[in-house]
Image (cartoon, grey):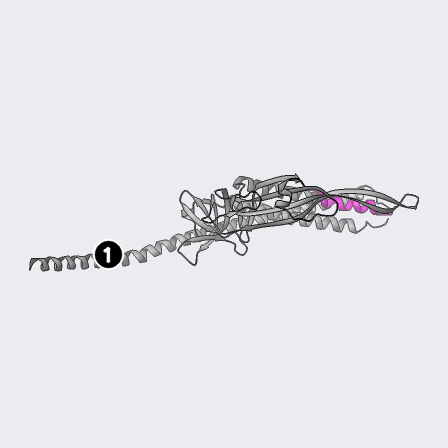
Amino acid sequence: MQALHPAGPIIGSLVALGSLAWSLRQRRRHRLLADLPTSKVRGVFIGLVELNGTAESENPLTSFLAEKRCVDHRWTVEEHWRRTTTESYTDSKGNRRTRTKTSTGWETVARGGDGQPFYLQDDTGVVLVLPVGASIDRAPMFDATVSRGDPLYHGKGPDGSVRGSTGRRRFREEGIPLHAALYIVGDARERPDVVAPRIADADDAEFIISTRGEERVRSGLAMGSWALWTLGLIAAPLGLFIAAQASDFPPPPDVPLRLSLVAVAAYLALWGAGWAWMAHDSIIGLRERVRQAWSLVDVQLKRRHDLFPTLQSAVAALATHEREVQTALAAIRAQ
């Protein structure tokens, strides 16, 4: 019996391992968001925080297509094409033949966008957000498909055309409108210019800016994790079946089946080990965040302990000085 073709098991294993690793990563992010408490802006502490509020700016941008006030926007212009090509092929009898093939599609002919720092505002105050480096879920702001006679066709798009153009263009834009509700997870640090926090990108820290809200972000991560897990579970045995079919002398049916069961068992074992490691890492991370929060409380209490005696002495000295001044003024008036 000829050995199974090696390409199938190798490809199946790589797809399964890659899907498993990415699935666990998505699940880890999901657990992180579930563990994070939602803070108010006034209660932002140093470290990873989760906030809800609205996007505000004193000098907002104007989006390119929708022409709406915003703090971030991205736009694309796509042109529809239809192309006919002639290709050669060999038929079942070994004869060379030609055939005509027509294909259609969309090609991006222009794109752009802009963004700026903005403030997240809730009922307790505002905090500065520096969005560079964030994973941003933008909201749709503009979507239109027009023909050449429409003013938008050349007004917002380039003058030239792609090969095989059908005279149709699709204009799309998404962004963060001014006053839009936002869900933000990011690293908080003190601003260098004023005594206030700011949210910005940091090494190895989650940074999410989303117009979809916390529940939709978390559900998207969970669904993506399970979809990748299922893909890996299918890919693990599928490579063996492909290898069996590719062999010149296919093995008995029970051989690929037994090997597939072994592959599935190995995949589930790796998944279980990865899940246990992820859960342990999540618990450790939660413990460290709690310790950090308590340390910040201790810092604030220490500041108050050191500040109040000094403030009391200053107030007492000011009261003594004012009393002496008033006594001196009274003596001068009495002369």
Give the x, y percent position of residue 10.
75, 51
Label 1 secondary element: helix
Q: Which residue is mark 1?
A: 315
Mark 1 surroundings within 10 Å by alpha-carbon count, few (fewer than 14), some (14 through 19), many (20 or more): few
Q: Is residue 145 magenta?
A: no
Q: Nearer the viewer, residue 266 or 16?
A: 16
Residue 123 x, y percent position in the rendering: 41, 42
Residue 227 seen from this side = yes
Q: Count all numbered tags in the image, as a single digit.
A: 1
Q: Nearer the viewer, residue 159 or 145?
A: 159
Front residue of this view, candidates 223 and 323 = 323
Residue type at mark 1? Val
Q: Is residue 21 left or right of residue 98?
A: left
Residue 181 is situated, as x and y percent measured from the top left of the image, at 49, 41
Q: Residue at point 14% right, 57% down? A: 326
Which residues lie in the magenta part? 234-248
Reply above or below: 302 against 125. below
